[in-house]
Amino acid sequence: MKAPALSLTPRAANRVRFAAILGVLGPGLVSGFADNDAGGISTYSVAGVQFGYDLLWVLLASQIVLFFTQEVGARLGLATGQGLAGIVRERYGVRWAAFMISAMLIANTGSIVAEFAGCGAALDLFGVPNWVSALLAATVVVLLLTRGSYRKVQYLFVAVGLGVSVAYLVSAVLAHPDWGHAASSLVVPRLASSPLYWLTVVATVGTTITPWGQAFIQSYVADKRLGPEDLVAERLDVGLGAFLTNLIGAFIVIACAAAVYSAGKQIDTSSPDAIQQIALALKPLAGDGATVLFAVGLLAASFLGLGVVPLTSAYAACEAFGWETGVDWRVREAPAFYGLMIFFIAFAALFILLVPARMLITVMFTAQVINCLLLPFVLVFVMRLSADKKLMGPLVSGRFLLTVGWLGTALLVVLSLTLVATSLFGF
Amino acid sequence: MLYLSQAIGRPVRDQHGEPIGRVADVIVAIGDRYPPVTGIVVDTNGREIFLHWQSVTSLDASGATLGTSAIDITKFQQRPNEIRLKLDLMDRQIVDIDGRKVVRVNDLRLDEVEGSLHLVAVDVGPSGLLRRLGIEGPWRTLARGLHREVPERYIDWEDVDPVERTIASVKLRVPHKGLAELHPADLATIIDQLSRNDRVGVITALDDEAAADAIGEMEPDTQVDILEDLEPARAADILEEMDPDEAADLVADLSHESRAEILGLMEKDEADEVQELMTYAEDTAGGIMTTEFVAVRASLTAAQTIDRLRELEPDAEMIYYVYVTDSDERLVGVLSLRDLIVAKPNTPISRFMFDEPVAVHTDASQEEVTEVVARYNLLAVPVVDAEGRLEGIVTVDDAIDTLLPEPSKRRLPRLFSRSGAAER
């Protein structure tokens, strides 16, 4: 028998390396795409409608912060093979874990309700009644998560995320924006002193960097069983995710800026169907196609959020109790994990079906406040854990990452608390 | 009894009652069945010092008291066989033998064993979690008001693998499901010790197979008591699950009325077998044999015989020998499973069977049977009647039962294991 070739040609070796990197890609992309869920798209649209191109610089800035927070989360997952909830319990005890998880579960439930509302708003543009879209979305997500393997679910998440990107890219192009203006706004901040401007800045960052996003990337990396050796590929993954996330955000802002703000249209952004009005406002200038694409993008983004947020809740609760987690298990092999996930989806679906629209806004608003209050705790946990040599081994945060991380944390804490203060007490 | 969480953070006082710090951790030496406490770690103004257990006079939920005022303030050095309960075990992930995540350590339970404090169990129940959250008391009051119990669950330290110093998780030694499923012999021991009423309660809660396994391991008197106390229909179901030889012995001991009633409720085939076996005296080959064996005709080929085995799906206990009979059911040969597998598929079994099989007579005494089994190194010996017809087989475990003095019989592990939870 002929001996097998022991070494690869340089080209083949490169191909193998490339394949290995592709194999690692996923958690960062999915987490990034999911940050642009229903809430994200509403926020970006409102930013574009109210301030035109002016807020584009925020997207570039939040992209950088997002990269560093997600990178720490992914690194914790790589180094420990555990989700955040589990490590917080091990390191800080049951009470801190209980506090973090209960707050996160409540806030996440609000987010899931918002995802359902997003699906509903998108399908409403095609004349689908709300209860049909809620039931349909819930059923599809549950089937997907309970039946699919990790690989399949991840591929689908990435595909949906790319679909959202394309949808908004095309609707931005169709809106005939002033590209030069957009490009300069991306790099040169155009500051304004109005409180509404700053509130929108805070909301834009807040919709991108969330407690659940932080918990999700870590659990998802651990669920994929990636290890310290995947650090480089995972950083690439996170970078790509952060970049694409904010690119989509930028396209949404650009589309709305061109079709609504520059066209001099007025939209009451505080009304419950603002997002639908925005989608319809694209029509005169950008044509029917843009409205359809906007709606499809919203639907896909909400759907992605509907998959990822309940998954995060189930990961967090199971990790804290030590129950088996993972998309690869069959339902009966990880009953608590799937049971909780289905429970959160069903609970939010019932909510959207039974609770009147006016109260839904209160619910989502409350969830956002809880998210803002929780984010500082989550970031401080993450930063402290990532500096723990015993826990992280070679993946421990170096001086540069720690400095950047704590700066970002401080910034986000200030932004979060500002948002809470203004939401609760007004200016 | 002391839970680790009750002691952590409590004051440590010297022999004069002066506080010197707080309990930061408790140290045990692993290796023993229940690891003994060897010391405590005290936090004195942010500095951790180690106190040997000999200098600690008491450790409870109110804190620790020392018997000495001279404290060695050298920095704590962990020895290889020692673990720090809070740092190394508390809140850790517990994984099943196959690596699956089961639950986390909610608390650790320490008990006095032979006069000193040992780590005895891992608290994995809701009560432990409530205690850690500091709301166990109010919760229990509330639960009592609602007439609910607060569930407590523990894993015995014996069922946990000895842990290394750098543990990411704690591994179980017994499958998690198996923790609840005791071995039939252990279950039998427990049931033997219960009152007559309680026994029926326990058996009623088991499924037929588990009940049959447990009853099979019990003392004959207890067996009879239980069967007579059970609903006759349930007793019949359980007997059907038992090996026919065991069932026959048991039925023979029942009162006449119960016997007739229970046999009447059993499936006809099984009842007939039991009744046939009952005709033999208890201490003879006929009395200890089982009628579950595989017999085929000499005209079959090897392949046909294997097909036949597949159809019958015999239990592991009798598959190793295939007996060959003629048209009058007289024993004419024996095949081992090995012979059957290595033979060419089309070869008639009469060509390669062993045609002078060792057999015992139904009247043969138990001692004779045992001797035959031992002399020929058999896993089972066939039992024939006066005309040479194959009536049953005695398996090696039933044969050597007679060699052992009565009390230790139950302790011997079965040579042919039942497919249990452990194998999954």
Image (cartoon, rainbow, N blue to C red):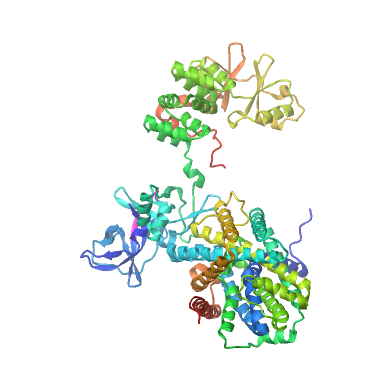
* Relative to A198, residue B212 above or below: above
Name the image quarter holding residue A241: bottom right
**Count of marks placed on residues:** 0
Decide which of A299, A126 is in the foreground and name it.
Answer: A126
State which region is magenta: B33-39
Q: Residue at x 35, y 53 (%)?
A: B141
Decide which of B172, B324 is in the foreground and name it.
Answer: B172
Decide which of A283, A339 is in the foreground and name it.
Answer: A283
Q: Does residue B37 show up magenta in the picture?
A: yes
Residue A255 image offset from top left, x and y in percent: 72, 78
Residue A40 image offset from top left, x and y in percent: 63, 72
Q: Residue at x 62, y 51 (%)?
A: A330
Name the image quarter holding residue A173: bottom right
Q: Is residue B299 left or right of residue B282?
A: right
Residue A122 image offset from top left, x and y in percent: 69, 66
Q: Is residue A61 left or right of residue A22?
A: left
